[in-house]
Amino acid sequence: MIKTKAFHFLKPIIPRKIQIFLRRILINLCLHSCRNIWPIDPKSAIPPEGWTGWPENKKFALVLTHDVDTQAGVDNCPLIAEIEERLGFRSSFNFVAEDYKISKELINSLKTKGFEIGLHSIHHNNPFISKKYFEKLAVKINKYLKDWDAVGFRSPSMYHNLELIHNLKVEYDASTFDTDPFEPQPDGVGTIFPFWVSGNYDQKGYVELPYTLPQDFLLFILLQQNNIDIWKKKLDWIAEKGGMALFIIHPDYISFNRNSHYEKYPVKYYEEFLTYIKTKYKGQYWHVLPRDIARFWATNHRGNNILSNGSTKERKKEKIWIDLDNTPHIPFFKPIIVELNKRGYECILTARDAYQVIALADRFGLKYKKMGRHYGKNKIFKVLGLIIRSMELMPIILRQKPALALSHGSRTQLVIANLLGISSMEIYDYEYAHDLIFFNPTYAMTPEIIPDSSIKRNRVRLMKYPGIKEDVYVSSYIPDSTIKTDLKMDDEKVIVTIRPPANEAHYFCQASGELFEATIKFLLQKEDVQLILIPRNKKQEDLISKTWPSAIATDKIIIPDHAINGLDLMWFSDLVISGGGTMNREAAALGVPVYSIFRGTIGAVDNYLSEKGRLVLLESSNDLGAKIKLIKRDKNFSPNQSEKQALNTIVNKLVEILQK
Ligand SMILES: [Zn+2]
C-alpha cells in the first residue's frame, strides 16, 4: 500500500524529464521521414466546397488560443493578456477545471477585456479512455461550460474523438490539428479550414477548429528551436492559401525572465511573432475569437462535413499493430490475425529478429516488417536495444496510424504506444515478469485463472479470457508427421523433448540451470530414450554441443538445425521437459505429459496446470527418478479439439475496443 502511494507521488516528477528526453530523441529522428507532411501538409490547403472566402474579404483568418495546464500557467495569464492587448490582439484561455485554482476575478477580468474562456477538460489527462468514462466526464464538463459561460472545448494533449464530443454542450471543439505527427494521437484532420461535425438524431452538431501552427511546446521545448522561422514559414503558407491560422500558446512554458529552464522559452518569441503578423499582413487577416469563427462557420458552412482525408469520422475499419517479439507469439497471434482479417480489420505486423521469430513467422505465412534484434543479457544493452528499436519503429507506426497496439508483452510496443498515445492491449499470462514502471498499456488481458490480486497494474483496464493462452492455437492444431523423419526420431525409443531454461530472460534463476544439467545426465543414462533438445539461442546450442558431443554424434541427442513447428514436435514426443512457460503449457494443452524444471516463482497458470495434474513440477534432482515416467504414449488419436472459446473471447474483446 505504502509502495503504491509512493509510486503515485513520484510518478509526476520522474517520468516528465525522462519522457521529454526520449521524445526529443525520437522526434528528431522522425523529422526527416515526416518532412513531406510537417510543418506543411500541402494536401490540407484545399478549401471546402462552395467556399466564398472570409468576411470582409480578408486573405486569411487568425485565431489565438491558450491552454493553461498548471498553476504556473494561470499566474502567467494576465501577463500574456497584457502583451496581446498592447499589440491589438485577443485570444481564448482554456482552463483545466479541477487541477488548480482559478479565481472568478481572473475569469471576469479576462472576459471584460474581450478575451474568451474555454474549457481544457476537468483534469489534464486523456478524457477518451472509454465511452463510459467520457460520458460521465461530460456531465461535469457541461456544468463548468455553463458556470463559465463558455462554448468551446479543447482536450488535454489533443486527444480527440469527434463522436464523443457530441456529448458536450459546445459550439466548437478545438482538439484536432491539420498535421502534427508528433502528437500523442497523431492523426491530423488534413485541413487548414474549420469544419462542421454533424450529429446523429437529436444531436445538434458543432464546429471543429483544428490548430494549424505548430505548438510552442514542440518547437521550443522538444525541438529546441531558438527562433520563430517555422512559425513564419507556416503562417506565410496559410496566408497564401487563404486558410485559418490557429495558434496554441501555453502560458505554462513561457519565461518572463532570463532564467533558462528545460521546459520554458522566452516570451520574446511570441511577441516577435505577433509583431511579424501585424506588420507583414496589416489589414489582410480576419482576427477573431474561436467562438466567433465557429459561429461564422455554423451559419455559413454547416452543410460541409469536410474532412478532406476522410479521417476521424469517416474512417471505416481501424488498423491493428501487432508486434511479434518472441517465438511463441507467432502461433498465438496467427489465428487471432486470421479472425480479425475475417472481420475486416487490417493487421500491421512487426517482428523482432530474436530467437526463432523470423523463421517461424515465415513458416506461418505472416507478412511482417523486420525490426530490431536481441541485444543480450546485459541490462544496459537491453535498454539501448529497446531505445534503438523504438526509434526504428516510430516512423512506420506514425505513418500507419494504428488504432490499437497489440502484443503479448512487447516492451518496445508499449513504449511507442505510450509516446504516440496509441491505445494498447497487452495480453499476458505470466504475472511476475517485471513491468516497465512508467509505461502501462491501456488495456490488459489475462487468463481468468490469474487472480486479480496478483496483477499489479495501475490505471489499466483489465479483461479476462477463459482457459489458457495455448488453447488459442492448440484448438485448431492438426498434426503433421513429417517431423518424425525430419528429426530422425527413433520410433522404438521414448522420445523426450527438452527445452533449457531461459538464461537471458529477466526472470532467470540459477537453480533452473542446474536442474537442467542434472536432467540431461539422468536421461543420458537411460538406454531406450532419445532426446530432442531445443536450445533458445546459439550460445546455448554451442554450450550443449560442447558438453555432450558424443551423445550428439550418435543421435542420442538431436538438436534441430532449422525452425520447427513446436506443436508437431511435442505431439510426436512421449514427454516434454521444459524450463520455460510456453512449452510447458503447449504440451499440457495438447495433453502430452509434461514436466517443468523452471525454478523461479511459479505463475498462476503453471500452478493451475499442476493442480489439475496436467503439469508435473520437478523441484530437485531427486525428483527426476521419482516423478518422470519414461513410457511411450499413444499418438493415434487427435489432440483435444477444445472449443475455440479462448480465441473467440479475445477477438470479441478486441473488436469491442476498436468499435469504441
Ligand atoms: Zn494542455
Image (tube, grey):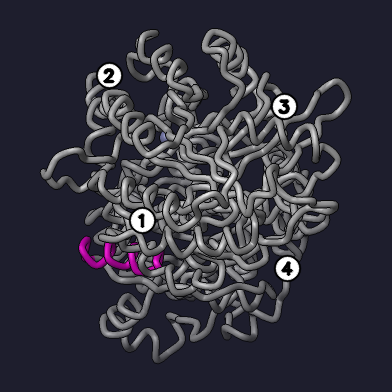
Mark number displayed over residue 166: 3
Query: Looking at the image, is 498 positioned above or below residue 427?
Result: below
**SS at circle 4:** loop
Q: Is residue 553 above or below residue 461?
A: below
Q: Mark 4 or mark 2, which is nearer to you?
A: 2
Which of the image's four quarters has the C terminus? top right
Q: Are marks 3 and 4 in contact (CB under 8 Å)?
A: no
Q: Amino acid at mark 2?
A: Met
State how far apart marks 1 and 2 are (Cα).
40 Å
Q: Given contact means CB atoms under 8 Å apart, are the residues at marks 3 and 2 in contact?
A: no
Q: Is residue 633 visible?
A: no
Q: CA distance from mark 3 to mark 2?
A: 39 Å
Q: Is residue 488 above or below residue 319?
A: below
Q: Which residue is mark 1?
A: 219
Q: Would you say residue 386 sits in the magenta stretch?
A: yes
* Residue named by callout 2: 1
Alpha carbon separation for disc pair 3 and 4 = 53 Å
Helix, strand or loop status at disc 3: helix
The tag earlier along the polypeptide, 4 or 2, is: 2
- Location of mark 4 (residue): 479
Regarding mark 2 in the picture, which secondary structure is present there?
Answer: loop
Magenta residues, start to end: 378-391
Instruction: Name which residue lies at 55% across and 40% down.
Output: 287
